Amino acid sequence: MRRTFLALASLVLAIVSVSTAASAADKWDLTVSPVFFYNGTTDAGAGPPKGEIPLYCPNGSAACPGTMPITNNLRVDYGIAYHFDRRWSLEYTHSNFDFSLGRITSIKPFSVLTGDIDDRTDTGKLNFAAGYGLSFDAYYFSHQRSNLAATNAFGGCYFNGISCPGNVSNPASINSNAYGLGAAYAFGPHQRFEPPMFKVNIDAQFYPRPIARTAQNCIPPGFPGANAPVCNAEGIPGYVSSQTTYPYELTMFPLANYQYAPRGFLPFIAYERTVVLWHAENSPEAFNSAIWGFVQVLGHGLSVSYTNFKLNGCYCSNTVPAPDSIRSDTNILKFTYDYKF
């Protein structure tokens, strides 16, 4: 979810840049953002329906926690950018995205909870502002899943975190690395210190991966009831060579042209087609994401933002049986300090 991780951060920075004047001599841009993630998925910690087995604990044993730990985390995003001139810049960002998925009950006879999921993305990016609302970027990103509560509760290598107990590499990890090209077009009416009312982003992301030597129906080591071949380090169910995905995003700033809007207060709504290709998968997953919130510029490089991010799996690529889907609802409160020098 490269677009997901960076959209929230870049949105705040872009709005702050519009609302604050920078000296032509300023070449560096340093940002530090404490960010608080709070779960809004109502059934993220729900117990199993009657007659179903909680997959997050071994056979529903007494050692099973009464409740699955869900997202309630404080993290820190940060980044640094160098501006060659008003058009070209080079940046590095480290961004967090913590969330909890809703309960899945359609994988009979199991009831599946993930609990808190902690994702990290590091991105290096070259930006070019072409003018007239057009901008382009080229980037490389590395996505890591640093924690998955279900793995810790289950005590085995059954989910897609970066490692298994004992710091052993997980063959079912969803870590990913890719190169990307992005284009954005901002347009529509706006006041002097507001961004244009509409913005469209589209990316092409290339995931370089070797062809698998793994059986297509392999399973993680030690999975209960296993009859299929065990996966090797190439993943589950194995790579199928390099692929390219095309995520996109549509954003609207409804008060961009409202002359009586409070100075520095910028609400936004967005739709994002999130497309991801994890390390352990042989085909991309697609999600429909609804995003809304606001940014309040406080001055002196400070801003605060709130974002509600609803993620819902598309049935065109969903990995769980209908009517369930991979879904989450996450509240994000972020304070940003942008220092120019």
Image: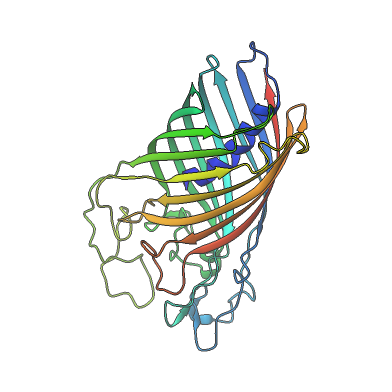
Residue at the image position 60 percent from the left and 38 percent from the top: 197
| Residue 8 placement (x, y as % from top left) | 59, 43
Q: Residue 339 is drawn in which quadrant?
A: top right
Apparent side of residue 120 relative to residue 32 in the rendered image (left or right): left
In this rendering, the answer to whether 18 lies above or below 161 is above
Apparent side of residue 102 relative to residue 294 in the rendered image (left or right): left
| Residue 154 placement (x, y as % from top left) | 51, 70
- Color theme of the render: rainbow
| Residue 266 placement (x, y as % from top left) | 69, 40
Query: 276 or 151, which is in the foreground?
Result: 276
| Residue 203 placement (x, y as % from top left) | 41, 39
In this rendering, the answer to whether 107 lies above or below 71 is below
Residue at the image position 58 percent from the left and 57 percent from the top: 99
Q: Residue 158 is drawn in which quadrant?
A: bottom left
In this rendering, the answer to whether 306 lies above or below 135 is below
In this rendering, the answer to whether 281 lies above or below 115 is above
The reply to whether residue 35 is in sight is no
The reply to whether residue 266 is in sight is yes
Apparent side of residue 278 relative to residue 135 in the rendered image (left or right): left
Outermost residue on the top side: it is 25
Query: 97 or 318, which is in the foreground?
Result: 318
Q: Quadrant of the C terminus?
A: top right
Residue at the image position 74 percent from the left and 34 percent from the top: 259
Query: 202 or 40, which is in the foreground?
Result: 202
Q: Residue 298 is drawn in which quadrant?
A: top right
Outermost residue on the bottom side: it is 51
Callout count: 0
